[in-house]
Amino acid sequence: MVWKDALAHFLVRLIARLPLSATHRLGAFAGAIVARWPNRQRRNALMNIALCMPHLSAQEQLRLRDRNLREFGKTYAEIGYLWLRPVDQVLGLVKEVRGAEWLRREEGKGLIVLSPHIGAWELAGLYLAAQGPTAIFYKPQRYLDDLIRASRARTGGELAPITAKGIRVLVQALERGDFVGILPDQEPKANKGAVFAPFFGMPAFTMLLVNRLAKRTGAPVVFLFAERLVEGGFRLHCIPAPEEVASEDDEVAARALNEGIERCVLTCPEQYLWSYKRFRRRPEGGVKVYTGPLDDAHVFRHVRRLQGG
């Protein structure tokens, strides 16, 4: 609806005027409220953490969930700041880049850069496009779409929609020797071009797009994400993907992709988007994950059922 989009624009621009430290305090407060009372975001985050981190005790899983929701609040509160503040000011928030050598491209060869939903993924995309010509795979949004497109393009990124035409844009970019940016941890909508592969031991419907691009163009694959620092600013991490992401075997490739995402998540698990319904799609005959009451006791009971306990 038009009024909802207008309201979203107003709120984003209003919050963007605050200092980043105040924005983070506001986001953490909002996240703490979400963590306080039963709701779907809270339930889904705990469900995913309990399924993916079974080595943690129930109390440790609850503490991680609550920290994660505060970081979740910071992530969305800071987006306006990252979208609307001057580019030099935004890129100046990067205090350290670990593994920067993995972002170097060979002459005439592109590089596939994967940014999971960790910390400030909008900052990761802006930083990548500032390093050289970049095509970013992009899903048009119902609200704030014009603002998103303008922001992601302001360091030089070319947005490629999630369509067959958009995939051609990615291929052409890699053939020119450019960067290609992809969010790799979303559940594909189409049956074609995806398989189930383990993600922290749980079957997750996983894209094969990265595999197809790597095989077709020979481009290397790396991960890039922005970790939010307690003292302010962000640390970027560049991590090479497992070589098997370019495997001829779809299931081997998807497993390798998820293993790479797992490695990124474990760097700062409290900043991963645990509330996302990563296991919404289930193998045939599989029990639904995100269902039932919203209280924590139900989550733990349901997880035991899913784990066969």
Image (cartoon, rainbow, N blue to C red):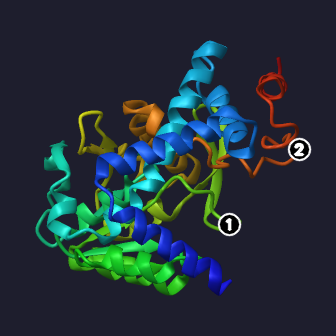
| Amino acid marked by disc 1 | Lys
Disc 2 packing (10 Å; few <14; some 14–19; many ≥20): few
Residue 248, x across and y down, in percent: 48, 55
The quarter in which the C terminus is drawn is top right
Q: What residue did someone put label 1 on?
A: 189
Q: Which residue is depicted at the point 29% across and 45% down?
A: 240
> Mark 2 highlights which residue?
285
Tell me the element at label 2.
loop
Q: Is residue 268 left or right of residue 106?
A: right
Taking 212 as reference, is 272 above or below it? above
**Image quadrant of residue 32?**
top right
Kindly identify the residue that appears in the image at 37 percent across and 61 percent down.
Answer: 122
Judge from the rendering whether residue 18 lies leftward or rightward of residue 38; answer left or right: left
**Which of these two is toward me, 164 or 184?**
184
**Front-most of 271 and 38?**
38
In the orientation shown, which residue stands out farthest toward the left?
A: 107
